[in-house]
Amino acid sequence: MTGVALAATVTLVLAVVWAGRPGGPPGEDPGDVVRVGVVEGQSVGGYLASSRRELAMLTDPSGPAVGETWALVSLDAYTASGRLPAMLAGVAVAQVYTRVPLPDARTQVSLIPIYSMPGDVTAGMLDAALVRDREQADYLRLERSLTGDGRRAERLRLTYGNAARTAAREAAAYREGCACVFAAVVRGAPVTLDDIASRPGVRAVDPAPEVRSLDRTEFRPPLPEERGTVTAEPSPQPVPTPVPGVASASPGRLPSSIEITVTSASAGPGGFPAPAVVRSSPELLAVPSETEARTARDPSGASSGASGAEPER
């Protein structure tokens, strides 16, 4: 009886320990993140060729049968929401990536979850416009708070003023229903994905059968204007007053904000929670922090400015 009791205790302890472990197949690192898309140091041309090869392998009749899979669809130009239903017909669309293409300013990339098209795209753009309005107000507030005449204060005023004008232009474009969509994450049969790859306006279809969960996947679609080798992005200072919603200014990779359980060959992990911004595009202005603005307003901060200190980035 003592032996039986000990065995039961050990079994119970093991069960508790196992229950406390993160989910996922045995041997899978819970911290693993699947990356799909073009990465730093890779040429866009090489990425497009690789995507074509992977798609050809999935649709090869001599290969193993493959069911529906996730894929990253990149467009060859910024596209209006009204064109998406025809371009992506035949697959389930989970999310789209948007950016207001301004020739003289770097703008943020926004991720919009999709239930139905094109209505959700339009709604997501209107949400992004509201966030840009708040960002503009924050930048203007910081610009007005700088009353000094020194070079440091003048530089900060110029930076905040430019950032406010860029945010205003983005908001106006989104409200007008701009042609701003440049990529989408979809799920469909390989033969349908192959058909989409040949449709006008589609630049590449990158199949990702290794994906298991979109919320553990980073998607990095190339921007339509990107042609050469992709370089590491800078790390501009986020909006001084963090604003929740569709557009956080935090740069970096393109994480999914959708949680659907699934399975992809581009780079290795759905439910649809709130939208989230994924990254900034290559020319975003680095905006000084509110701390630096206070330093510029404080006469004692003049020495700091003269020392050559740069804004937080």
Image: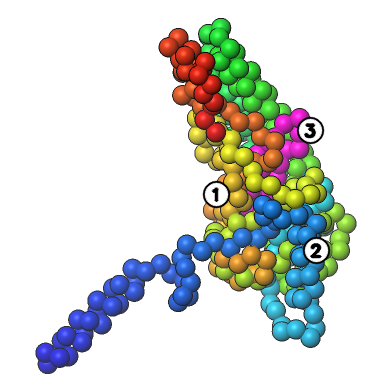
Q: Earlier in the sequence, mark 1 or mark 2?
A: 2
Q: Nearer the viewer, mark 2 or mark 3?
A: 2
Q: Secondary structure at mark 2?
A: helix
Counting from the top left corner in percent of width and height, residue 79 is at: 80, 46
Amino acid at the residue labelled 2:
Ala
The tag on residue 49 is 2
Image quadrant occupied by the N terminus: bottom left
Amino acid at the residue labelled 3:
Pro
Image quadrant occupied by the C terminus: top right
Query: Residues in magenta?
Result: 93-113
When the figure is inspected, residue 124 is found, relative to residue 154, above or below; the finding is below
Q: Mark yes or no: residue 175 visible.
A: no
Is 36 displayed left or right of 58 in the figure? left
Task: Say few, some or many: other residues with alpha carbon within 10 Å of mark 3 (under 14 / 14 to 19 / 20 or more).
Answer: few
Residue drawn at the location 83% of the way across and 68% of the way down: 195
Badge 1 vs badge 2, beta-carbon distance below 8 Å: no
Pointer 1 residue: 274
Pointer 3 residue: 103
Q: Secondary structure at mark 3?
A: loop
Task: Say few, some or many: other residues with alpha carbon within 10 Å of mark 1 (under 14 / 14 to 19 / 20 or more).
Answer: few
Magenta residues, dominant SS class: strand
Task: Say few, some or many: other residues with alpha carbon within 10 Å of mark 2 (under 14 / 14 to 19 / 20 or more).
Answer: few
When the figure is inspected, residue 217 is found, relative to residue 99, above or below; the finding is below
Assess whether residue 243 is covered by the magenta stretch: no
Q: Nearer the viewer, mark 3 or mark 1?
A: 3
